[in-house]
Amino acid sequence: MSLLRSGAVLAIGFVLMWSSGFVGAVLGTASAPAATLLAWRFLVVTALLGGWWALTRRRRLPAREIAVHAVIGLLSQGVYLSGVVWSAELGVPAGIAALVAALQPLAAAALAGPLLGERTSSTQWAGLMLGLGGVALVVGGDLASPGAAPPAAYALPFLAMAGLVAATFTERRVPSELGLADSLFVQCAVSAVAFTGIAVLTGDLVVPADGTFWVAVAWVVVFSTFGGYGFYWLNARRSVTRVSTLLYLTPPATMLLALVMFGDPVTPGGLAGLGVCLLGVLLALRKPRGMSASGEMMAACTSTTSSARPRS
């Protein structure tokens, strides 16, 4: 097994890369609207992946594959990022959005059984609930300050969470033969069209003169898109419950990144939440005790067959 495919590397890579989106968002929106950052993020990603594809692949992608990954891209990037970004712009505290996002592992675990045949044990359920409590501790300050957002804005984090869940199950349920890079190319190209259209309509496509904007674009392209979504889909190929559970570690990781990058203080509650989240994830990722060797082999074969392709 290669180092890149080892479970620990996939898990750590995903948590760090997914959490990096916070840093990029802070850097980018300091000099430009969110619509500008999102549009140029995916325009740059699409140009890079498109150039790579033209030089190394030079083959037509089947129309069915394009359609499948266009839908996955709109759900996992378009719907998810729109819900997160615009809820923040409307005044929804980041902590509340993070807590709503932390409901995803519970939703994924509940659906993984009937849709994918992935068993969730009682110990794993306990870990999922514990992880949710840990996230609540990490974002406790925001939960105590509801903010001034209009009531309808609080539906956006739920929309974002639902979009990512739907994209994850679509990727696992719909057979595909595309590799990770080809899949990301299609997904990001569709997102580029969507976010560029929004930026044009809102008059936010013009690039600001501040050079830090391009630093932010480079950050979200390399770390949040290639790293975050790349590791997300690699983990999802193994287990939907697994990758969703790892999301519990992204609020604590974001808290630590904010300390390092911006000097944001870490509260005692945040540190306690970090420990609780870690314990919850360790419990939730434990393999069901009753799973036999043949059951493990069957699950592995199912995972490999259903994700001959991948899935910010």
Image (spheres, rainbow, N blue to C red):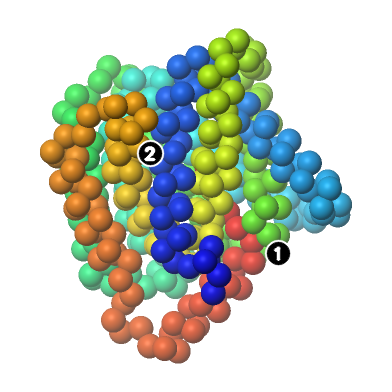
**In this picture, residue 13 sits left or right of residue 217:** left
Residue 8 visible to an observer of this rendering: yes
Please tell me in which quadrant of the rendered image residue 91 appears.
Answer: top left
Q: Is residue 137 above or below residue 115?
A: above
The residue at the point 53 percent across, 33 percent down is: 219
The residue type indicated by label 2 comes to Phe
Q: For label 1, count other residues whose C-alpha is less than 10 Å away and answer few (under 14), some (14-19) or many (20+).
A: some
The residue at the point 41 percent across, 41 percent down is: 19
The residue type indicated by label 1 comes to Glu
Residue 98 visible to an observer of this rendering: no
The residue positioned farthest toward the left in the image shown: 268
**In this picture, residue 243 sits left or right of residue 64:** left
Residue pointed to by mark 2: 158
Q: Is residue 28 above or below residue 312?
A: above
Q: How many marks?
A: 2
Residue pointed to by mark 1: 177
Disc 2 is placed on an element classified as helix
Instruction: Between residue 170 and residue 308, name the one nearer to us.
Output: 308
Q: Is residue 223 above or below residue 299?
A: above
**In this picture, residue 182 sits left or right of residue 117:** right
Looking at the rendered structure, which numbered label has been put on residue 262?
none
Instruction: Between residue 306 and residue 117, name the one nearer to us.
Output: 306
Disc 1 is placed on an element classified as loop
Q: Is residue 281 above or below residue 220?
A: below
The residue at the point 59 percent across, 23 percent down is: 214
Quarter of the rendering occupied by the N terminus: bottom right
